[in-house]
Image (cartoon, helix red, strand yellow):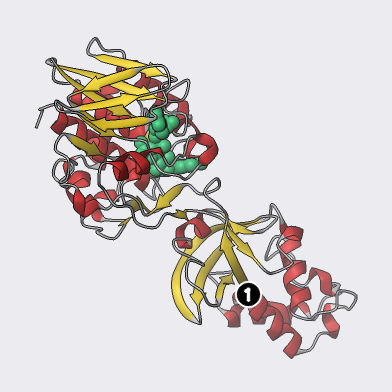
Amino acid sequence: MMVIGIIGGGASGMAAALAAAENPEVRVVLMERQARVGRKLGATGNGRCNLTNLHAAKGGFHGEEVSFAEFAVSAFSPEKTLEWFSSLGLFTVAEESGRVYPYSDQANSVVDVLRFALEKENITLKLGFEAEKVKKTAGGFRVESKEETVECDKLIVACGGLAGTKLGGTMSGYKFLRGMGHKCTKLRPNLVQLKSSWGGCAGLKGVRCNCHAAIFHNGHLHSESTGELQFTEYGISGPVIFEVSRDVCQEKGDWTCRMDFLPGIEKDTLMAELVRRKQTNLPASELLTGILHNRLGRVLSQSAGISQSRQVCQLSDYDLQQAVLAVKEFEIGLTEPMGMDSAQVTAGGILTKEFDDKTMESRIVPGLYACGEVLDIDGDCGGYNLQWAWSSGRLAGLHAGGNL
Ligand SMILES: Cc1cc2nc3c(=O)[nH]c(=O)nc-3n(C[C@H](O)[C@H](O)[C@H](O)COP(=O)(O)OP(=O)(O)OC[C@H]3O[C@@H](n4cnc5c(N)ncnc54)[C@H](O)[C@@H]3O)c2cc1C
């Protein structure tokens, strides 16, 4: 009986195991170093698990060779992925944005249906098995942990990336694949908070707001998006920042983030409202009350140079114009992204051109496969990374298991 070894019981490893085990003539050995499978999966989407995005077949992936993701994601598309999850017993719900979540709103529901599905006669689950050495042998591969050795005919490396270190992100997969002759591109944190040199962030910690964020590098637009922003102790976070964070501060130079805190409202409209407020008895500290989060409004009017002890009726049109600019074009310096622990995904990874995109098999070592985040593919925020894990994992499993 052919034995397929899979290192990593995360999203892509579980998808690969289930796909390979569809062939009853194959025995799958799934090796996971943690005490349970899908530990990171259980923490995704703020505990809700954004398991796919209905638009993922149209793109939203990055890497040196972006087209590498196309075949897998169209062969096992978001629709097919949802049918598959439905067959495993998972109820799901799609938001208008295309993001899909389990109906229970609990990431653990996703882990549970996969965990139950893995209880199959031809799948052996080895929990607490930390692969330390991987060797190519005459007939296949040998995977060694401290306590045990697994011999297999084919091997799928599904160890994930370095992001989310506390949830299981490791260098293991890169190390094993490099050890067998593959190259790795530079690893960078992506979908990550950004640190700022602006001293005001800590005072706004916890404030959430809608915002258009545009990142500039030496004055040139690097990336932009609109959505929820959250201030943190060190800088800025939230979905909109995750969306623009790829490769920020990776090159030397001046990095800034320009924020428009009223993306749907023109400057003239805001100016007209502030001029109207001159007829009130409002203190200047309340200039933006009713428009923005109170704390944010105060910080912005202060940074527009408006003394908080004055009355709105005493402010000049110039003062109000400065306030409008602070709301619509607030620019802060960026110093670096937070580290891999805080990142949701690793940008960079094992060079994809050394793998066959139709099978996920290595072009260097026959019988060796890789899938998921360990490869140089990462996706946009919103379910794209898990879709890549399901699609690439399933493709690797089907091919290794002889089901293609
Ligand atoms: C906080 C957070 C939230 C996220 N939210 C989302 C989201 O909502 N939607 C989305 O699409 N993506 C999300 N992501 C990204 C997504 O979780 C990953 O891209 C995806 O899990 C990658 O799948 P993978 O199988 O490649 O790796 P993982 O799921 O990380 O699985 C790899 C597994 O391999 C095991 N392993 C590693 N080394 C060894 C070894 N030597 N021996 C044995 N086992 C080993 C690890 O313990 C782990 O279980 C999030 C990530 C984080 C960190």
Residue lying farthest front? 138
Q: Residues within 10 Å of mark 1 (few under 14, many from 20)?
A: some
Residue 359 at x, y percent in the picture: 15, 40
Residue 374, by quadrant, is top left
SS of the residue under disc 1: strand
Q: Residue at x 40, y 38 (%)?
A: 172
In this orientation, does residue 100 appear? no
Q: Position of 107 compared to 179: left or right?
A: right
Residue 90, by quadrant, is top left
Residue 344 at x, y percent in the picture: 47, 47
Vertical arrangement, residue 265 with respect to residue 45, above or below? below
Q: Position of 328 compared to 377: left or right?
A: right
Instruction: Choose between 400 and 318: the one closer to the eye.
Output: 400
Vertical arrangement, residue 75 with respect to residue 120, above or below? below
Q: Residue at x 68, y 64 (%)?
A: 292
Instruction: Choose between 343 and 370: the one closer to the eye.
Output: 370
Instruction: Choose between 81 and 376: the one closer to the eye.
Output: 376
Residue lying farthest right? 309
Question: Amino acid under label 1?
Answer: Phe
The quarter of the image holding the N terminus is top left
Vertical arrangement, residue 198 with respect to residue 343, above or below? below
Mark 1 highlights which residue?
330
Residue 119, by quadrant, is top left
- Find ligand 1 in the image and state its quadrant: top left
Residue 73 at x, y percent in the picture: 22, 45
Residue 57 at x, y percent in the picture: 24, 50
The quarter of the image holding the C terminus is top left
Q: Residue at x 20, y 36 (%)?
A: 368
Find out if the beta carbon at label 1 lies less than 8 Å from the nearest ligand 1 atom: no
Residue lying farthest top? 121
In this orientation, does residue 239 appear? yes
Q: Residue at x 28, y 60 (%)?
A: 64
